[in-house]
Amino acid sequence: MQRAVLCFLFLLSYGFAHSEPVMASDPVPPVKPITPTSPHDFIEGVDIPPSKPDATAHEATKETSAKPKAVDCEIDGATVEQTMPFNGADIGDKACGVAAPVKLLGIHDRDHRTSFSSPITVSCEFAKVFAEWLQEDVLPAAEEHLEHSIVKLRNGPGYQCRRRNNQPDGKLSEHALGKAVDLTGFQLGDSTFVSVQEDWGAETREGRFLKSIHASACKRFTTVLGPDADPNHKSHFHLDIGCHGKSCTYLICQ
Ligand SMILES: [Zn+2]
């Protein structure tokens, strides 16, 4: 009888000991391909060459764990629509998301305004850097090299929940954190169009304008990739403020 009780106790403890790890472990999510948020032009390729360091994974967790609240994001000379924080959980990747998002609709000063081909959804932090670059570097460079103001940018959407090479286990793109935008061209007041793909590298005023703003972008963003970077960027400039290297001081300008 005593033996039976001991045997029962043994089985009971064995059962608990072996069931516990199963109960404590996280459920394994099904592996799903990442679906881009929109069928946009700017979803191909990698944003950072594979040989470069990248430390975005921990940042994603940090940003998306913030409690939802509206952000106060005022940017001088920019038309900004504030939006609620969001992540990519609804499309299967909650590491994507922006804790302090804004929709950037355009920039303006007393004399003229520059609109975007579509609203740019990015973090407030990125929106400030981007708006300042346009106001202080790009518009003056257009006046200097092209003698016309820019009336419209041709741009990507900014935020896109995607990973490098669009692989489910690839590292997050800075687009997935609202810290990047892609630009393909600039519409001028005289209705000419400066195209990154067509005009980059040309010994023309359009080519010099593009070189000039690429150089000035490298002083404001942590990553600037253009047609010289790799074939994935032959049609556009990719600009981001991602953290590269342990101290976030590593810059990529190609
Ligand atoms: Zn990009």
Image: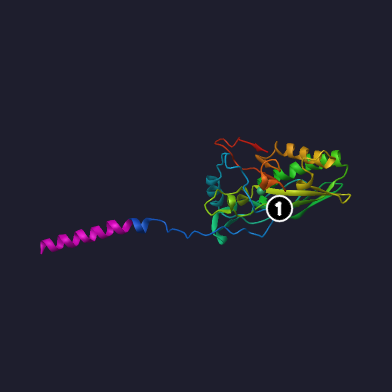
Task: Locate residue 160 relative to residue 21 in the image: left or right.
Answer: right
Q: What residue would you read off at disc 1?
A: 156
Task: Locate residue 211 relative to residue 251 in the image: left or right.
Answer: right
Task: Locate residue 219 relative to residue 113 in the image: left or right.
Answer: left
User: Residue 77, percent across and down?
Assistant: 78, 47
Rendered position, 98 above or below 134: below
Mark 1 is on which residue type? Gly
The residue at 66%/47% (across/down) is 232
In the rendered view of the protein, which quadrant contains the N terminus? Answer: bottom left
In the rendered view of the protein, which quadrant contains the C terminus? Answer: top right
Residue 45 or residue 110, whichever sits in front: 45
The residue at 18%/62% (across/down) is 8
User: Residue 118, percent across and down?
Assistant: 74, 56
Residue 40 or residue 178, whichever sits in front: 40
Q: Which residues are magenta?
A: 1-20
Membership of 210 in magenta stretch: no
Q: Main secondary structure of the magenta part?
A: helix
User: Residue 225, percent across and down?
Assistant: 68, 42
Rendered position, 102 above or below 12: above
Membership of 11 in magenta stretch: yes
Q: Image quadrant of residue 4? A: bottom left
Q: Is mark 1 within 8 Å of ligand 1?
A: yes
Q: Image quadrant of residue 11? A: bottom left
Task: Locate residue 65 relative to residue 207 in the image: left or right.
Answer: left
